[in-house]
Amino acid sequence: MKDKQAINCDLLIIGAGFAGMVAAARASSLGLKTVQVGNSSNLFLVSGLFDLLGVYPMASGHILHDPRTGFETLTADCPHHPYSKTGYKKVLESFDFLKNFLASAGLDYQSKNNENYFVLTAAGTFKPSFMVPKTFLKGCSIKQGPPKRVLFVDFKGLREFSAKQIANVIQDTCSIASTLTIEIPDVSSTLHPTRLANLFEDIQFLNFLSKKIMPFSKETDLVGLPAVCGLNKSLETIEKLEAMTGLDCFEIPGMPPSLPGLRLKNAFEKQLSQNNVIFLNNSKIQSHEFKNHHFILTAATENLMAEITTRGVILASGRFPGGGLHAKRERITETVFNLPVRQPEKRNQWYHLNFFNTGI
Amino acid sequence: MLFAFSNIDFFLTRQKFRPWLMKKIIETQVLIIGGGVTGTGIARDLSLRGLNVILIEKQDLNAGASGGNHGLLHSGARYICSDPEAAVECSNELNIIKKTAGHCVEETGGFFVAVSGDDEKYIADFPGKCNTAGIPFKKIDVADARQMEPSLADDMIAVYEVNDASINPFKLSIENVNDAISMGGQYFSYCMLQGVEIKNRKICRAEIQNMISNEIFYIKADTYVNASGAWAGRIASLAGIPISMVFSKGSLLVTSKRITKRVINRLRKPTDGDILVPGGVVSILGTTSVRVASPDNIFPTVDEVDRIISEGERMVPSLKTCRYVRAYSGVRPLVSEGNNDDRDVSRGFTLINHEKDGVDNFVTITGGKLSTYRLMAEKTSDIICRMHGIVSECRTKTIALPSTESGEWSEPGVHISESFAPKTRHDPVLCECEMVPASAVDTIINSIKNNKGNPDLISIALRSRVGKGPCQGSFCSIRILSHLYNTHELTHGAGINDLRKFLNERWKGEQSLLWDQAIVQSSLKEMIHCGLFGLELETH
């Protein structure tokens, strides 16, 4: 038998991805009694970057240095877009709110008001993004500042991150792009990112690492590392490494499992719990009704059945990976309330034949 | 200085427009055009008879119908009504291939299954026609059949057992090429025939373009074989010879798990969605027959996928709900005889000695099917030997096809158990869905380089299970790219375009199957490769 519990609240947030987490942060900061249901574990898939607008119009592939210029065109083109209804000023305020919220949980982000960062990725590409972890920051100067001498470091066994790949792909952007592969004693063929992150939290490992980097210090301005530099105090870890080597260091985001995503998960969960948000993790809505101006929903976790009475609901259950939408062969459905989903009539119109098509 | 430089630059860029500059000429006895099962089969057959061969292919092995089929060695029973002659050929070849290329074959056995509502006359005629064609079969009690294959439909009304088998056509072509190379033959991938020069009723040389470097070169051979399948009409036209082809596209679906032990055929007149072939750890359901104008740029459509599933689920109901990992298409090369239904056009092959067209050293082989590839190669090689004045018996009937290391990794699932713990500590698994370790990728890279090819994601995936599991290349693509950079096979930004091409190639097979888990997987792929890496943008 599962325990039963009745919960009364102002707001129920369904979903524990980015949207659900930020909604819970905002609602609880405004003093609403907030309950959140969902599953936060999918945050290990996110890169850790917060975008505003990197490309507009999409079909042209035009990359925006200043997101505001694209924002203005977009609001003129699509008056019903959420951005058009919110306005640029309010969007910036929300980014600031989020930045402060994460900072209070010990996770430091940075943004510039009218400028995108160009974040170097593990593929060797540069991604326009608006608010980035401070540990990524120095890598953004490669694309925008004067040419740098960069040393890329990878780890034997970390299969999806190649320093040589990045150095090769971006060699024309740097004045020198050199590489260093670290072999960790006792590591078998595969090194899991979370294991590496644990190592980074050990000062002896940082010592070992800085000794390997030091021989390159004369011809290096910047050191790029995979985004695995610790789980909890990544900025502190990077700063320690900088002090040891005397070189500027930064992280490069790549394939999941993503440490920057896990850092966000931890930061949100820590701060939301301080804000007294009740988080029913790994829960699913089982039933719902609307009565006397209130929603009454039941949510089930592994050992708890909660009856939640709430004045309002925010549905932030995501798309297909989050489970908010479900595709059958014939139709796409919304999974919690069975809301109508606007969609093309036939499945052959769901997707373009070219995976990289940007036209809409 | 600057002036001198730009002059060299000018010289280099203009080179291909200066016919008086010497171009490379390679000589051989036989030039074979087309790297499918037939072309590779001919390369081996002729090598065994002592002839020196070069095989050219405008893409890579099995790029056409040889790579776009069920991987089924027919018992012959499917053709007993529509094409009894082909039925007999299939039956004979099945026994030869099982004996000589057993390592490419899985002896699954097969069922012909009729469900309620199927044509009773066809069912009644089946045993007699099999007898006439000499195809072994056995009637199976419906209750026994359900015990033997629990996935079969409840409303089965008749079941016959035949000796179908499944074959891995990629492995088959790789092994045939490897064997030809071991006897002195050569294989050039991404080399396309651009034209032939004919003098005194003979092709005297072929003009070839390397599709990667764009280099033009010549091959001088004594005889020329057009084994280009659906492209046979196009190749023959370069020699001024018309061959009228019709193109019949067939699409197939790959399930994420193997569903039956045996090949399951629908016991009725051949039509859509009526064969389910197991291969390793997956099953393949097909097919369709859609007339297309050209054999290029074909892909499975949503309509075809839905039709295949709704037909297939009559025999095996779980096909309605199971997960599919990808779909693909092939084009049947059929020589036009004016019929309307492409399934009625003979599946038998067409072998043309172009002596009758005024070219004495040129042969075209097309049509046919995977099951009879060896026979097609034999008959073609017979003519070529006659042209060379050589009396030599075909030896592919008796000499076993050797098994080589680089052919091993194309087998679905067979290595999962063997390679679960890669042998050395420095051998990371790069493709986790199909358990392909770095050492296997290295073996494949070496074999591609030995064949003068360019190791990239697509050519590695062609020779292995890489990218063919449920993740459809989302993860292994990046790992293999990293590996290619780490081993200096790739430099500069070449890998980014390579990655784009590879993901788009996988996408062709995914886009018609996007429901349930597959759409979740593809959303994740989009998050990583577009959302983070921005591959849809030209940032380089």
Image: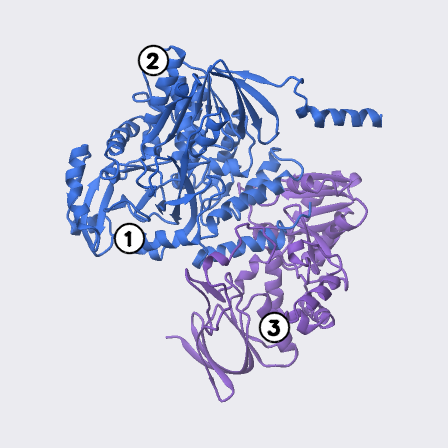
Residue drawn at the location 40% of the way across and 12% of the way down: B388
Considering depth in this image, is A314 or A17 the residue closer to the camera?
A314
Secondary element at image label 2: loop
Give the residue number, with chain letter if any, for mark 2: B392
Q: Is residue A284 above or below residue B414?
A: below
User: Can residue A45 be seen from the camera position used here?
Assistant: yes
Using the numbered discs, state the Cα–Cα distance from disc 3 to disc 2 in whole angstroms. Answer: 80 Å
Residue drawn at the location 55% of the way across and 81% of the way down: A312
- Image coordinates of residue B468 in percent, x first then y, are 45, 44
Instruction: Chain letter for blue, please.
Output: B
The quadrant of the image that shows the C terminus of chain B is top right
Q: Residues within 10 Å of mark 2 (few under 14, many from 20)?
A: some
Dot placed on the residue nearer the N-terminal end, 2 or 1 = 1
Label 2 marks a residue whose chain is B
Give the residue number, with chain letter if any, for mark 3: A23
Considering depth in this image, is A356 or B325 the residue closer to the camera?
A356
Label 3 marks a residue whose chain is A
Amino acid identity at mark 2 = Ser
Residue B500, numbered circle? none
Amino acid identity at mark 3 = Ala
Using the numbered discs, state the Cα–Cα distance from disc 2 to disc 1 in whole angstroms. Answer: 48 Å
Instruction: Chain letter for purple, please.
Output: A
Q: Nearer the viewer, mark 3 or mark 2?
A: 2
Give the residue number, with chain letter if any, for mark 1: B316
- Image coordinates of residue B31 in percent, x first then y, are 47, 20
Using the numbered discs, state the Cα–Cα distance from disc 1 to disc 3 in whole angstroms. Answer: 47 Å
